[in-house]
Amino acid sequence: MPIINISDFILIILSLIFIYSLFSIFNKNKKINFIIMLLLLLSLILVSSYLFLLSTNILILNLFHIFRFSLFFISFFSFLFILILILSFEKETQYFYTLLSLVIIGVLLIPIANSLITIFLALELISISTSFLILSKNEYKLESAVKLFLLSAISISIFAFAIVLIFPYNAQLTLTNIINNNIISSNYFIELALILFIVALGFESALFPFNFWVPDVYQASESNITALISGINKSVAFVAIILVLFIVFISYKQLFSTILSVLAILTMFFGNLIALVQKNIKRLLAYSSISQAGYILIGIATLTQYGLQASIFQIFAHAFMIIGAFSIIFWLQKQHNLNTISDYKGLSSRNNFAAISLTILMLSMAGIPPLLGFYGKFLLFSSAINANMLLLALIGILNSFISIYYYGKVITAMYRKTRAKIISFDKQALIVASVCVFIIISLGIYPQPLIHITQIISSTIL
Amino acid sequence: MLILNQLISQFLSNILDICILIPAIAIIFIALLKEKHSRQISILSTGLVLAISLFLLIYFYKIGNVNITNSILFIKSLNINFNLGLNPISFVLFLMANIILFATALAGNVHRAEQKLSSFLIILFQISGIGLFLSLNLFIFFIFWDIGVISLFFMINILGSPNRRTASMKFLIYEIFASSLLLFGILIIYFYTPIHSFNIQKIITNSNLIPANIQLVIFVLLLIAFAINLPVFPFHSWLPDAHTEAPTQGSMLLSGILTKFGGFGIILLFEMLPIFKLYSNYIAIAAIVSIFYSVFVLMKQDDIKRVIAYSTITEMGIVLFGISELNNFGLFGSIYAMLSHGLIIALMFLIAGSIELIYGTRSIKVLKGIVKNARLSAYCFLIGTFAIVGMPLTTAFIADLLIFIGAIQSFGLYGIIPLFAILLLGAFMYFIINKSFLSTKKYSKNIDFIRIEQKFVYFILLFFIFLFGIFPFIILKLLNPI
């Protein structure tokens, strides 16, 4: 009998989630569904953080590479999924759990992927199940679900095409071997493939020219699904970008650095400038989340370990900020039908907790110290200056300044004095929002642990 | 004896941490406890730190110099330390900040409205103000700067008067623009000094190794950031609006402490990049323009708070003028001017707040015969006016004396030009006093109901104004130890 390694447990738990997704279709008891998912995710967190401490570095079947980078992201994403689960507890149909478990598998496969096929499959799993998740509640979401479905189908085919373009050179799909770095110095097809990869993943992570689906989808879907899309799907797309670019295309780094810095500048300006005129709070956050993607790109574009560290830090910060914000919006929209900024007038006198947490989350997004978002931006801009990209840093800082206007607008609206009826608490949103706010404040006051961890994991990539 | 000295030095090295820890603990208590306790906690917190700073004043006066530093490792991975320290310059501002913070906590909230929020924001600003003047590290300097801006933004935005929204947004946009420039400048300094460090002392010793064009970039970025905060003429327009709409405690902190961040920053900037002392003439010209502009605009104002707000721009212009003289007289004079201006302006805004409370208006045309109803406030305002203009026995006199001696040393007789602006300021302030405070022709019969602790705060502020005015050597001995 072969000995089971601890690192195999990650794959075993993933398969368990797969098997569970079959049963969850027939299981109508939401509590049992919730508890099973929670236990599986918690065990994943435990196993991966244990392996992280052991600094594991194992290849499984050449398809999966389990190392500190992937272990960090597995526990991080599992934690985010627990937040999403809590948020949607008893508010969704049973199919929610089936679809969500498929998304979980897709998301968790990407950090451990060592092959382009794995990434391809995972992306497909994520995007198809996400489109159905948008649809699952009622028919009004049809348009945005179809939009997302079509666009992700196209982006995945682009991804497949890109794989086709580079496959013939070595006839291998393992990330490290797909391009033989010695032979090819500048090859037209490989450069084309690189651009196609960026396009395909740019759809998922909502970079500038490929992000027109974002506001519609964010606005149309329920806010817990929006939190999933903006918090997790976007972060995992960035993980895929990091893996593909830094492992496969490392010999083309000058080219992708140029492309990514241009995309970063366009994405930041696009997100921030359009967010200035938004009236709907979900659209505003959608555009702000687009601009956050631009900031994250800055770090990747610098090509340094410090920049990568900054990007990972910002991915972490952004996920908690956006999930916290959408959890509050979910509560306010679903139960009290607050949609636009003018609906948010006087929120502080109606429910102080909601106003204070939204304020803290938005200040963190705007990069005000001592909150987590500030350190993300600080690391990103300093990495750009460190790599002698002064212009990129300047534009980033300028954008960060622009963003204060629309966050300030929402905050100002929330603290107007009005007489309206008090908003009752919602337990799930309360838990999720307080977890996010707690993380943002505590890691904001003492960021050393997170900076240390991101430093370690960025050194495993570069 | 040696052991005793060691104990004292041990205590002194931790005292700076304690100064930041006290408000940090207080803010948690305010957030957790009920509203009725929050005012006491804020008074306790500011009072304790004031007591510590007065103790330090006596201690430093005895030993004759100011020099304590303390450093804790903050972010190990990036090699950022939590450097705190006091030198003569920062100690004077630290002392001033503590006096004003105590005064604000005790009397600032004249309406006694939203005690919990108000106390919370005062203590948040206390962390910022104390931390900023104590910081020896540009990174934590920036963090404390932004905390101060945000706490005052909320103070205007939530507690201010009806038109507060646009004013607070304007304040936020100006100040965040300044802090963005500041952040950019700090990052450039960090990466272009050969030893990558945020420590101000290390930057000062290594700044000549930064390439010249980069030095120019840094200088321009930081100068604009500090000029917005100070404020100097083209960047000043946030200040009058913010002051008019801010609650009394907000105005006191805003004018008393926040504007000093910029002054302190410019002094640091000249220490860090001494090359740019060549261009100090241009800064002096900008300061003179700002002084005259604000005085002329001030004459058209009808709102007492707006008048005081514009006088802030005048005074801060004089501070900038003093710094640009680049001699000891100018430097000490401008630090003294910041001390004096902080104390006086806090007093003036507190009085303006109480007059608004009593009469329900701040318009100079409407207010008549304050001296009949609110005698104490009227006389304190009178003394404050004299103090702004620089009457002997008050701190402003010492400040102006030092600054203009320095000006004549540096610029010759041209240095006297800003003095005319002060004369104009004095003339107009006297006009206001005559028209609304002292005139007894037609006066309304409002009753003076300001609280006893508010009167006590008048006394505290006046006490320090006269203490440092009559015995300037207390401060000057620290600034210039012989």
Image: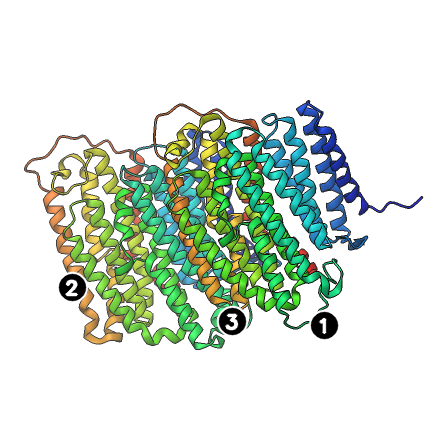
Q: Residue furthest right?
A: A1
Residue that badge 1 annotates? A182
Q: Amino acid at mark 2?
A: Phe
Can you tell which mark lies on residue A309? none
Q: Are marks 2 and 1 on the same chain?
A: no
What's the colour scheme? Answer: rainbow
Nearer to us of marks 2 and 1 is 1
Residue B401, quarter of picture? bottom left
Dot placed on the residue nearer the N-terminal end, 2 or 3: 3
The residue type indicated by label 3 comes to: Thr
Q: Amino acid at mark 1?
A: Asn
- For image coordinates 21% across by 57% down, the residue present is B294
Residue A400 rendering spot, x and y as whole percentages: 44, 54
Chain letter of the residue carrying label 2: B
Task: Please report, as a chain letter, where disc 1 is located.
Answer: A
Check disc 2 and report its element: helix, strand or loop. Answer: helix
- Residue at left offset 29%, top offset 38%: B454
Q: Position of residue B246 (x, y in %)?
A: 30, 42
Asked whether the viewer can see residue B348, the reply is yes
A222, above or below A148, in the image:
above
What secondary structure is marked by label 1? Answer: loop
Q: Are marks 2 and 1 in contact (CB under 8 Å)?
A: no
Tell me how far mark 1 sits from mark 3, CA to CA: 38 Å
**Residue under label 2:** B420
In which quadrant will I find the N terminus of chain B? Answer: bottom right
- Label 2–label 3 contact, CB within 8 A: no
> Which residue was labeled with disc 3?
B193
Residue found 18% across the figure and 30% down from its top: B447
**What is the CA distance from the residue labelled 2 to the residue labelled 1?**
77 Å
